[in-house]
Amino acid sequence: ASSSIMAEQVFTRVTNKEQLLALANVLTGDFPHSVTIYNCLIFHVQDWLSCMNFFTLDDPSHSHAVIMQMINLPSFVFVYCRESEVNSLIQAIKKTNQLMKQEDLIYTVPHYLEEPLQMLAQEMEICVNTNIVHRFIYQPHLDTDPLRCGPGFRVCRLGKAGLQQLLLKSTFLNNKIPEESMLRLTENVPAVGVYLDPSVTKEVFLDIQNLPYAGDNEIPVSWISPTVYGTLGMLGTEKDFRRLGHATLVTRVAARLFANKGCIPLCHIVKNNTASKEMFKKMTEWQLIRSEISLTSAETKKNIN
């Protein structure tokens, strides 16, 4: 599918690090709408990932219209542009022809692109469903309380078994995210878990700069990770350990570590995930911003989270 974009010579593929960084710098002026793609660009500039292709309508040094497409799953696409560029971007997508005609299509776009893309899909006789994705963005200046873990537990970076569990439990993309991509990413942007540890007999203040790895065979009771598409996600807690504050704790730890890498912590919460939405609303350092829209082909049944 990426070749279909290039064949029409409508979009410019951005390949070298200098261009990727220039594009990221341009997108800083469009926060918060452009944060997801910005983070992914930083992941690729730093060589933490290499699983996405990036395309722009114009020269990367001044383009505000960007398509991000997963290499091994080309139907998974993020589209961004400013409101003033909607018409130009829609016309370009229309010219590429095949970009909308993919099985299991997942398009994630700013809210103002929903209607134009719906109209384009209708024109192309493609049936799509619309899902609202709530976006919470981290405000580091509001995150001032010390991080503490209670007795009986410890907080660690995920070891191999923890990372495998996270991918196994995640319903996102039906586990089509390559494990090697996640290993590479989390070596640089930590995935975090809470682990059972009876040897911890009192509350501990966390030093996130020296957070140890869990053992390769240890399984966490709560976990969160950076995602290959530029957010924090795949948050989960084992049933017997819910409502104990573990999910809040791993999210706070992971957000600080994510921000320390020069990225902007952001979480996508699907509309029907009430528990996660309520948790984020209770954390004062997370701000609910205008929702993104996920457009999926009618037969695609995915849990975007």
Image (cartoon, helix red, strand yellow):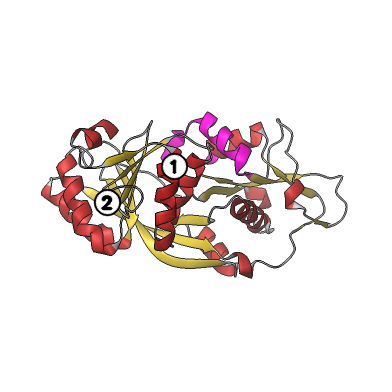
The quadrant in which the N terminus is found is: top left
Magenta stretch secondary structure, dominant: helix
> The residue tagged with tag 2: helix, strand or loop?
strand
Left or right placement of residue 223 versus residue 176 in this view = right
Left or right placement of residue 43 versus residue 153 in this view = left
Please state the extent of the stretch shown in magenta in the rendering.
169-191
Dot 1 or dot 2, earlier in sequence: 1
- Residue tagged 1: 18
Q: Nearer the viewer, mark 1 or mark 2?
A: 1
Residue 238 location, x and y as percent?
A: 63, 46
Taking the spot 41% from the left edge, 47% from the top edge, the residue there is 303
Residue 184 location, x and y as percent?
A: 57, 34
The amino acid at mark 1 is Glu
Tell me if I can see residue 163 in this picture. Answer: yes
Label count reads 2
Closer-to-camera residue (50/121):
50
The amino acid at mark 2 is Asn
Left or right placement of residue 278 versus residue 229 in this view = right
> The residue tagged with tag 1: helix, strand or loop?
helix
Examine the image and state in which quarter residue 35 appears.
bottom left
Measured along the vertical axis of the image, is residue 241 above or below residue 16? below
Left or right placement of residue 290 versus residue 75 in this view = right
Taking the spot 37% from the left edge, 33% from the top edge, the residue there is 71
Residue 118 location, x and y as percent?
A: 20, 54
Residue 186 belongs to magenta span? yes
